[in-house]
Image: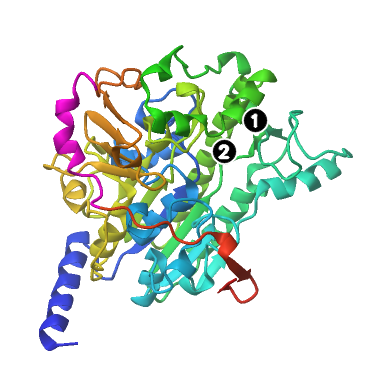
Amino acid sequence: MKPFLKFFFIIHFVLCVFRLGATSPPNVLFISVDDMNDWVGCLGSNRVPTPHIDALAERGLLFTNAHAPSPKCAPSRAAILTGKRSSTTGLYGNGHWWRPAYPDLVTLPHYFKNHGYTSAGGGKVHHHTDGFNPPDQWDEYFDLIQDKDLIVDYFKSRGEDRRFLTTMPRHPNDSLDWGPMEVDGMDMGDGRTVDWASEFLSRKHEKPFFLAVGIFQPHLPFYAPKKYFDELPMDQVELPINKPGDLDDIPEGGQIMAETRRKDLRMIEAHDDLQHCVQSYLASIAHADTMVGELMDAFDGSAYSENTIVVLWSDHGYAFGEKDHYAKNTLWERSTHVPFIMMVPGVTQAGSRTDSPVDLTCLYPTLTKLCGLPVPVGLDGVDVGPLLENSNAQWKHPAIIDYLKGNTAIRTKDWRYIQYAEGKKGEELYDLVSDPNEWTNLIDSHGGLTGPLRSWLPDRYAKEVLSKGAYEFDSSKYTWTKK
């Protein structure tokens, strides 16, 4: 390295550490919660108590207008962990492995590992199926334990020969199931992940660490300890409003996305189980919130509570009949709006909030800069450092959300603009101040407002990368070979 550059990086590191008020590089506690929409107390929802997530929000900065970079697990997590959008990489769906497509791409935990940190992870950090989590990113990893794998033993222990809690017809390997389990939450998959993370925090570490803790709930199946169901009686569970005729002003592109998993919605409705499904999702949120509380208790009792950046985020939202849609896979608010909290010692003000729009590609540049590391060039994400220091700072950036090739939503403070198939399959425009449910598409009456919004669309959309089916994957060696 040239002397000037070496001097620059040293000064940059010292200034970042000084700003954090620490004498050593800060640690990072990176908490992800899977499939959690905005039904948490700190974002104004009263559907289910979330005291532990709310408490974390009171300790740092709550981003009230935060959005997933994609409304689908694998592309969202790939964008978050690489700082590059789907439109840049061509990683558009769950059927795309990122490593064989981009063997030199360095993920966030790997980058910290390469810069002297201990990189440790547990649970669901990348997408949870085979081939998404190469081991070379980590110094230590605690594998995800899924509750759908525990349910068989649960039934056997009760002398029952069954596979599902609900009675709907489905494929034997389907995760479309929900209901209460008479178990201690710490014995479930997320409890075991949190136990591992708590033990990690109890150790003495010679190097700073990047600790990623992936909580799987409230992802399907919506299993949770029975106590949470008892606290959420069915007659107190309100269903989201599905306005009749809501899709009448939706263009072809939006109609196609809305139809995704509608078959599941119709099956749930036919079995009169939607209210139970929502109850189970809320119980799973309550369970996930308790896991956050357990983790934060371990963190607060550790030697690292004064010099650790804490981040909590979700990979996308979830719908239960709004706009006649179930689950995710759309560019509407319910699929993209997520909890996002950052607590940065010496930087964030406790209990601060910002309604400036952000998407979670911001995490890569923001965390590297806060920790005094050189920020990689070529990232799509925007550093939110100015908002961490002043939640009322001027902010010109929108949240940008991609889903499949050619489809993008632009979310500002007040508006959501959606373009489908690069404009070939229609557009939508919503005034979210007067129409938070996105019931009235204003594209025909207010189309003149879209010019500045369109300017944020990708200049181009990357070609979709090869699908999983193009490769042979060797899980023992974690290698891919083209067929």
Callout 1: helix, strand or loop? helix
Q: Is residue 290 left or right of residue 177?
A: left
Is there CB contact under 8 Å for labels 1 and 2?
no
Question: Would you identify the image quadrant in which residue 334 lies?
Answer: top left
Please name whichever residue, 447 or 438, is drawn nearer the observer in this view of the structure: 447
Residue at 53% from the left image edge and 54% from the top image edge = 95
Q: Earlier in the sequence, mark 1 or mark 2?
A: 1
User: Residue at image x 20%, y 44%?
Assistant: 456
Name the residue tied to disc 1: 227
> In this picture, which residue range is highlighted in magenta?
444-459
Where is residue 126? Give x, y as percent: 49, 57
The local secondary structure at tag 2 comes to: helix
Residue 309, quarter of picture: bottom left
Viewer-nearest of discs 1 and 2? 2
Q: Which residue is mark 2?
A: 287
**Quadrant containing the N terminus in the rendered view:** bottom left
